[in-house]
Image (cartoon, helix red, strand yellow):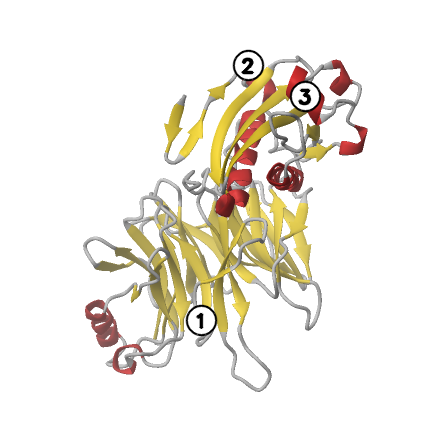
Amino acid sequence: MCKILSVCITLLIIGSADALKIEINKGDVRPDPIAIVDFFDKNGNDSEKGHAIGEIITRDLELSGLFVPIDSSSFLESSNVLATRGHNIKNWNVLNARFLVYGIINNSGSNFSVDFKLIDVVTGGTMLSMSISGTEAKLRKTAHVIADYIYERVTNEQGYFNTHIIVVESASRAGIRRKTRLVKIDQDGYNPENLTDGSELVLMARYSPDAQNIAYISYSDTDKGILGKSAHVYVMNLQTGSQRLLINKSMMRELIKKNHGNPVQMTYAPRFSSDGKKAVLAIIIDGKSAIYILDIDKNELKQLTKHECIDTSPCFSPDGSRIVFTSNRDGREAIFTMNSDGSDQKKISKEGGKYSQPMWSPRGDLIAFAKTFHGQFYIGVMKPDGSGERLITSGYLVEAPCWASNGRYIAYSCESGPKQKAKVGVVDITGNHTRLIETRGDAMYPAWSPKLAVKIK
């Protein structure tokens, strides 16, 4: 038995991982049938917690687009049989199941542990045998962690169910000026938590690589002499709620000098490097936007592009060596890349239309982007050299793509028509599987967290 943070895990893996790998880069992905039995107590009796965990795991795996849960009414073995005698593989083969998941839940007040198995129904082998402990307050998180282990064992890809998404939600009421709030939700839309109080207009959060901080845009103007009345980038610690300017006042004063003594018109579009030591952002001076890089530890700000056009939406490559951004320097918004020191700036988008909001995949193999072409809105992907462009979803309005931590799914803002509330959609990189995240109201400009630490207690 080994202990990972506060999760107690016993792990058994049998069989060839390569033989079980699912290829999900291709255009046609057929989901595998999986039988997930509600977890039961040691005597095979129904368990309220076990039923809830089973439902969450089932929903997670189904929403991934890679699994089709088999209706439990067709199961040929009861919980009591599984608890006392284990499974008979023939009874699951006849259902055409590819995988089987079942387990025992042990309750101890608000604490519990789950012993579960993942079975390869084709070979009859045990792919995964685990014991994981949790608390009633973290029941959903426990279920997401179990779903991650199942997903990872079957696909050989990193799970993404134990993650959060931060969205921008309207906080305005009729007759009151526009206000928004930042809201953190689980990746499936549950457990909303307000991060800001809705007293100001806030936009577009971005996670730090350790998921401890976010950078976001706010129109808060507590020091008008420095900030004026425009929007600027703030950093929030998600544990303490403390907030600070990303560009400190000393650096801001230097920017004011560059702007002929006037307050900087806007700082926006922030993103962290994968090591968290740097951030890139856009800054508007004299009505023109340029890309800057900030060394966070040294508090040093360096200009990478000129204030001659609109350069914006910078994003680091995973290794930090390159930056992708958009620019209208050629007359129409296009995607460019450059070295992280500002050298070797070159246009990579090759097709027609206007491009915006590029984001490098965590795997480094693709760049996601938003695009308008002939009046239609799209979310697409291309290789880092601009080749292989594919438009994977479209709509009345789709924008602001952001990657899941495993580089297989993209969340984005979408609206279905005029005056319709904004929602957050998710599409896989094949473009064949799309869904909406259920939220308590309108939601836009998603920011998907890195995979979170496995800490249940």
**Residue at label 1?**
197
**Residue at label 3?**
82
CA gap between label 2 and label 1 equals 51 Å
Q: Is residue 211 among the parts visible in the rendering?
A: yes
The number of discs equals: 3
Give the image location of residue 250, x and y in percent: 19, 69
Residue at point 67% right, 64% down?
Answer: 375
CA gap between label 3 and label 1 equals 49 Å
Give the image location of residue 450, x and y in percent: 44, 45
Q: Residues within 10 Å of mark 2 (few under 14, many from 20)?
A: few
Give the image location of residue 74, x and y in percent: 81, 29
Give the image location of residue 114, x and y in percent: 54, 30
Q: Residue 251 falls in which quadrant of the image?
A: bottom left
Residue at point 64% right, 27% down?
Answer: 101
Tag 2 secondary structure: loop
Q: Amino acid at mark 1?
A: Asp
**Residue at label 2?**
16
| Earlier sequence position, callout 2 versus callout 1 | 2
| Earlier sequence position, callout 2 versus callout 3 | 2
Tag 3 secondary structure: helix
* 448 shown above or below 121: below
Q: 315 or 147: which is nearer to us? A: 147
Q: Amino acid at mark 2?
A: Ser
Judge from the rendering whether residue 294 lies leftward or rightward of residue 415; answer left or right. Answer: left
Q: Residues within 10 Å of mark 3 (few under 14, many from 20)?
A: some
* 386 shown above or below 101: below
Q: Is residue 386 among the parts visible in the rendering?
A: no
Q: 29 or 365: which is nearer to us? A: 29
Q: Amino acid at mark 3?
A: Leu
| Earlier sequence position, callout 3 versus callout 1 | 3
